[in-house]
Image (cartoon, rainbow, N blue to C red):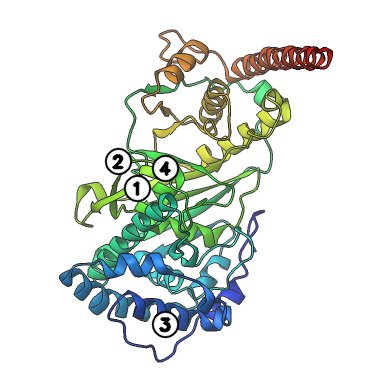
Amino acid sequence: MFGDGQQQDYKKLQETLVRSSDPAVKNGHDLVNLIRFKSSKANSSSMWSKNLDLLVEVANKLTGAEKTRFFGGTIPLMKEGVDFAKSTNLVGKFTTNKDHVTFSRQEIFNLLSCCFFCCFPESKGKDKLLNFSTLFEKRDNWKSDSVQKEKIKCLLNYFNLASQYYREDVMKETVNLTRSIVRQDPDWSNSKIPTVSPQLILSGIAVGVPASGMCRVDFANKRIGGGVLATGSLQEEIMFITCPELIIARFFSSEMKDNEAIFVSGLRQYSLHQGYAESFKCTGFLDLRSPESFCHRVVAMDALDFSNQPSWYQYEKHNVDRELRKAYAAFSAVDVMPILSGNWGGGCFQGDPVLKAKIQMLAASEAGKIIHYDCFGKTEIQNAVLLNVNCNRKETVGNLCEEYLSLLEYCKDADAKQKADFGNKQNRNKKRNQNGMLK
């Protein structure tokens, strides 16, 4: 295996790809039966007990012309793709190089066809989730079911478009995946590199669209892709489902380590969307000849989750250094400027936006990159970053070591304040409890 990340068992994946006489497919129910048939070697009889009802609902609501195209043209090519993946040992390509692999769009189509037909072993954990079966399952929760159906529509857009252009040059273009590993941290406290101030964007750029000429940061789950193949529909999941070629990164790494990030270039966007989380909707497709579909870059880096930790925990030096290491691994891998980032780890992971902006500024400066910091329309984040981070200053900024020491001082102050606030809260609760006992 390559790098320090946890990898898939590629030999086992390859052995489960199967070529057989397949049943005819004319509607959603036939399609589900085909999936169960194709997955039988990899998953024994387990797939027959699963409900894949959301896929049935989406497929059966296709118009007459859409059904003809999907069942008559796309599905047969997807079945060929499964056979091709087996005969050429596509999953074996992930073992050929330690930290870089290249696939044509045709090859990715073939691999994702295997995922669609659930040709890989089902994992008990989330770390090796490759098959689409979990996405196809109905949960009788209208919110999650609605989101999953919209994501299925995005996948159908992808397979229809990729099959339409399968024999053309656009599908011979390549997608590159690179694992970036930091084996020794930069000497932050002695670095003489000038810091580069982040450029703030208040208006917000569409979540799922890597901006043209930029590399967008994927606020990743350590299991890259997060809940893209389940109920999730936040920044990472939207990015992956509108650009499904990103999904093959799940073959590349089961779980990212603290010292690694994953850079993917050559991506195209296939679906349009609106909304976020429970309001996510697939609103159409992007033709591969459209300028908006053009090749994009994404770098995935996972933040620490502080949601279940004491409020001061994120300010401890070992956590700050971990986040610096992760951001540096990501930014040093990117081959273009600027890099479009934002409030990384600041949502449900409850990271301090100022702290994360400072960390990203230092890591980008050390990597020789420029950060465009997207505030997604949140003026409170913009104001906090403007007040506390080197933003848009006219004068020459200091050496990176000075900013690192300033970062540690910020953490020291924040740590003391958080602990004091926590102590005061504990005292108030203690007095409240004592008063209650007296009564």
Res. 296 mark: 1
Which of the two residues, 305 or 322, is positioned nearer the viewer here? 305
- C-alpha distance separating marks 3 and 2: 35 Å
The answer to whether the residues at label 2 and label 4 have Cβ atoms under 8 Å apart is: no
- The structure residue drawn at horizontal position 44% and vertical position 77%, both measured from the top left corner, is 85
- The structure residue drawn at horizontal position 44% and vertical position 22%, both measured from the top left corner, is 198
Mark 3 falls on what kind of element? helix
The crowding category of the residue bearing disc 1, from other C-alpha atoms within 10 Å (few below 14, some 14 to 19, many at least 20), is: many
N-term mark: 3 or 2 = 3
Which of the two residues, 392 or 161, is positioned nearer the viewer here? 161
The crowding category of the residue bearing disc 4, from other C-alpha atoms within 10 Å (few below 14, some 14 to 19, many at least 20), is: some
Say if 45 sits above or below 414 in the image: below
Percent x, y for residue 23? 36, 88
Mark 1 falls on what kind of element? strand
Label 4 vs label 1, nearer the camera: 4
Query: Amino acid type of disc 2?
Result: Ser
Say if 430 sits above or below 73 in the image: above
Query: Amino acid type of disc 4?
Result: Ala
Percent x, y for residue 138? 45, 62
Query: Amino acid type of disc 3?
Result: Asp
Residue at numbered disc 3: 83
- C-alpha distance separating marks 2 and 1: 7 Å
Query: Amino acid type of disc 1?
Result: His
Residue at numbered disc 4: 277
Percent x, y for residue 9? 63, 69
Label 3 vs label 4, nearer the camera: 4
- C-alpha distance separating marks 2 and 4: 24 Å
The answer to whether the residues at label 2 and label 1 have Cβ atoms under 8 Å apart is: yes
The answer to whether the residues at label 4 and label 1 have Cβ atoms under 8 Å apart is: no
